[in-house]
Image (cartoon, rainbow, N blue to C red):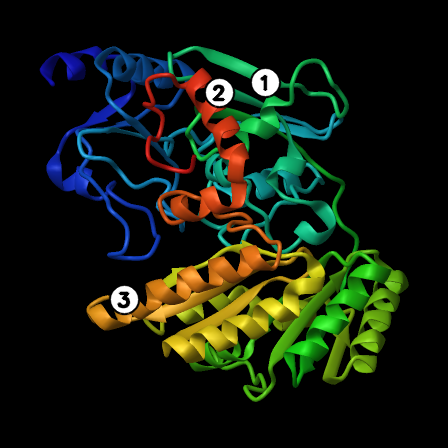
Amino acid sequence: MHQFLSDLDGAGDVVVDPDVLASYRADQAAPGLLPAGTPAVVVRPRTTAEVQAAVRAAARHRVPVVPRGAGSGLSGGANAIDGCLVLSTERMVDVVELDAPSLLARVQPGLVNARLGEAARAEGLWYAPDPASYEFSTIGGNVATNAGGLCCVKYGVTRDALLGLEVVLADGRAVRLGRRTRKGVAGYDLVSLLCGSEGTLGIVTEATVRLLPPAPTSATLAASFASLGDAGRAIARITRQTIPAVLELMDRTTIAAVERMAPQGLDADVAVLLFARSDLGGAAALDQVDRIAGWCEQEGATLTVTTDEEAEGRMLMAARRLAYSALEREGATLLDDVGVPLGKIPALLEGIERIAEREAVLIGTFGHAGDGNMHPTIVYDPHDPDAVTRARAAFAAIVALTLELGGTVTGEHGVGLLKRDALAAELGPAHDVHRAIKRALDPENLMNPGKGI
């Protein structure tokens, strides 16, 4: 170990204090349900060269490397392994370049999503991916899980905003992938391969992202539904006929949790609250949400509210942004992250309600109705073994239901430790192809081993 620590010279800040190491053991996923080891060392580099030094030392001594951003992940992807090197990007926070004429920025991975948004706005531009964690999650973490956000129905997820990456590979080489241009097919699309790979193929040290002109003024809709089926038909109708900037939902359990935490005057008796926003600007935005309101009413909405006042729109959307925080206040949370075809959203929501009743657990569901990515969140008592068992059973049942509906086990939070068993069921024979790629880029299996693939 002494020689390994000596070889970390040039890797940035090196931490071996046991109390500090303990704070780097796990991310925010499922307290008490996932294994978390104790790292041998934490390194906090500031430059690509320092990341290279850390990775080369780890490769020389065959020490596993666990990359970590803000530690806000919800799948155990940043959980440490006993004796590993945790490589934290928390000090790599620079906006390296903001090229306004080219509508792009180059940033280090530890930069918080909201800070990139501020830098873009200072140039009259906009960075579209906006996960609910945008105020504390990092760009590197967003890339690692291909994070989405409320605007993903129209503007896509992190992968859609990525132009290029700088990545340190398992042998310590730093390579640039992708390009600065909007189009280009020279070579394989390795940027897309690395995006969502959860640090298992390399460590992102810089991201080149596309920026957009600022969105025009917006209009907002909130619609209540007495049944899941009515809400599902409304979602299907909306997505067939228009593309709103935002299309989100919350179920009755989540609504009640939000009301308990921060009363908004929401009707806790409805089955679903649906939120939509248009950013077409001016009269066109209000016209779009009015049309959406009409479709909702035709499909059985019990109440629709629309506004083109920005402040009122933010108030309507505030409840959706509080969804996860409100459920966290109810107890420990086991947050799922499944995606189904749009037409299967009602079947998923109905199935989740049946699972909650069968397993006698509290499950609040919210998510991105516009792309079918739902976040059923199981609330449980981590100190009650029976409650933990029922939470695990409910989680497994939701994943199984998702696959039956032709869906995916993770839309934007990653596989991590939480869904490794479910991954094989989704990938089938193609699992071997993924493993072959992993072996080619990380033959010693040192990059975040045991996660994802």
Judge whether 11 appears above or below 338 on screen: above
Judge whether 40 appears above or below 388 on screen: above
Using residue 449 as the reference point, say whether residue 252 is left or right of it: right
Which residue is tagged 3? 388
Residues tagged 3 and 2 counted as in contact (Cβ below 8 A): no
Which circle marks residue 167 in the picture? 2
Coordinates of residue 63 in the picture (x, y in percent): 24, 21
Q: Amino acid at mark 3?
A: Val
Front disc: 3 or 1:
3
Q: Nearer the viewer, residue 98 or 104?
A: 104
Residues tagged 2 and 1 counted as in contact (Cβ below 8 A): yes
Mark sitting earlier along the chain (3/1): 1
Using residue 103 as the reference point, say whether residue 83 is left or right of it: left
Residues tagged 3 and 1 counted as in contact (Cβ below 8 A): no
Using residue 309 as the reference point, say whether residue 263 is left or right of it: left
**How many marks on residues?**
3
Q: Amino acid at mark 2?
A: Val
Q: Mark 1, residues whose alpha carbon is within 10 Å: few (<14), some, or many (≥20)?
A: many
Front disc: 3 or 2:
3
Which circle marks residue 177 in the picture? 1
Helix, strand or loop at mark 1: strand
Instruction: Tell me where residue 317 sits by quadrant.
Output: bottom right
| Residue depicted at x 61% and y 29% | 192
